[in-house]
Amino acid sequence: MKTNHSKRISQALKLLSEGGLNAALVISSNPPACRSRDTHFPYRQNSDLFYFTGVLHDELTLILRPHARNKVTLIAPPSDPHKKLWEGEAQSVKPLARALGADLILSKDPCRQTLELLKGIDLAYLHSSPGSLGANLRHELDSINSTGARNMPTQIGLAERLTARLRCYKDSQEIAAIKRSAELTSAALSYAADYIQPGMGERDVAVLLEYLYRLGGAEPAFNTIVASGRSAATLHYHALSKKLRKGELVLIDTGAELDMYASDISRTLPVGDIVAPELLDVYRAVRAAHAAAIKKVRPGARVSDIYRAAAVELTRGLKELGVLRGNVSQLVNKGAFKRWFPHSIGHSLGIDVHDPGTAADGRLTVLEPSMVITIEPGLYFSEKAGRVPPCGVRLEDDVLVTNRGCQVLTKDALSLDWVD
């Protein structure tokens, strides 16, 4: 019986063989990211390599060649006594190779070894990240082909585009992982919300959430956003420098990464017991947009239609607030709302918090079963508009597209109904 990872490799081999060319896919571990001088950020595996292998090894290369005798090859470094002294014994790659049915090659020079394996290949799919093996291979192949050498790939494709065609659909193992991540994020957010009070620092809330993630065996999937008052009008606010003030709203956008799978939740909460009626009306408009958008999520739904459903409710809210005037449908058609709702309705979610979609630009256009997306309408006022003071409201949940409709994976997060 095949493991989920070997099934994914089989699917990739099938994709590679469909184009009529002798094609190969090369995926390698991420290079270490320098923090300063000789210190590094905590290591994070290449998402595509984890998708196909489920391992966190930092010096591993996977090569898929559907037309070769050995269709699956792993390249790993031989034992290094110096590295063993400083970092401990490296985990053996042999069990992984056996599980994937891969040919294992130990090499100190994965670039040279990969070039040998690419001989006779017409099209090589390589990663584009600077500093990666894929980027180095691109440079080497450009140099080799400029000399008129034969028998090497003359066409280079983006590995990310090929793998996106698989990764946008989540199997049962992945859905379970996202659910676990969502449960941890929901629990942490509910816990932290009980501590929110005037005078507390934005950073205090973020640190508490990230502490709870680590306590649960996870890491933050992205830099936690805690934005109060005017700061919430900045979409990716990371200063975390303000104190929470009574009567304001605080926007929290956060998510855990557990077992390499992300969640992403946004909630906007009151600071104190009394909030201005104008802020409550903004919140109600976003909540209505959130509900209308989720109601549209089903197989075959166009993301543009989900976006429009949210835009109608946001426009209606802006009109009621005195920010816009006119017919709602006409205002939506003109995009009058975009000044206050400048982003999309959501994104794909998985190993990456912004997981790849099916379109050439990485976005999702039409929903299909087993996709996981976020729904996140919002309204943002960087300055006073009508009777609305500077503020920002965003509500976001993670949603699985099912065969008949959808399932909200973050349903246990903080209720949206703290205001009637």
Image (tube, rainbow, N blue to C red):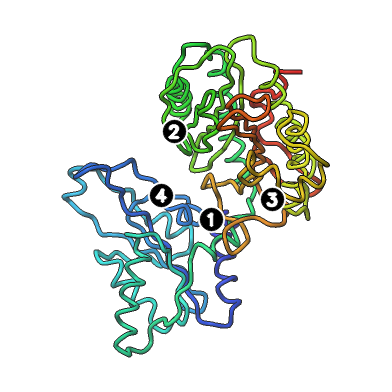
Q: Tell us which disc is closer to us: 4 or 1.
A: 4
Residue 86 lies left or right of residue 115; in this view the side is left
Mark 1 and mark 3 lie on one chain; the one further toward the N terminus is: 1
Q: Which residue is mark 3?
A: 370
Q: What type is the residue that disc 4 sits on?
A: Gln
Neighbor class of circle 1 (other Cα within 10 Å; few <14, some 14-19, many 20+) is some
**Closer-to-camera residue (272/363):** 272
Q: Answer yes or no: do the residues labelled 4 and 3 have beta carbons within 8 Å?
A: no
Where residue 144 sits: x, y (%)? 31, 82
Badge 3 amino acid: Ser
Give the mark toward the camera: 4 or 2. 2
In what element is the residue under mark 4?
loop
Q: Residue at x 52, y 14 (%)?
A: 245
First along the sequence among labels 4 and 1: 1
Q: CA distance from mark 2 to mark 1?
A: 36 Å
The label nearer to you, 1 versus 3, is 3
Residue 196 percent across, percent down from the top left? 53, 15
Q: Is residue 71 visible?
A: no
Q: Which residue is mark 4?
A: 45
Residue at disc 2, secondary structure: loop
For the residues marked 4 and 1, what is the alpha-carbon distance in whole angstroms?
16 Å
Looking at the rendered structure, the secondary structure element under dot 1 is helix
User: Which residue position holds label 2?
Assistant: 238
Residue toward you, 244 or 292: 244
Q: CA distance from mark 4 to mark 3?
A: 24 Å
Residue at the disc numbered 1? 5
Q: Amino acid at mark 1?
A: His
> Which one is closest to the eye, mark 3 or mark 2?
2
Q: Nearer the viewer, residue 65 or 384?
A: 384
User: From what the image shows, is residue 299 above or below residue 114?
Assistant: above
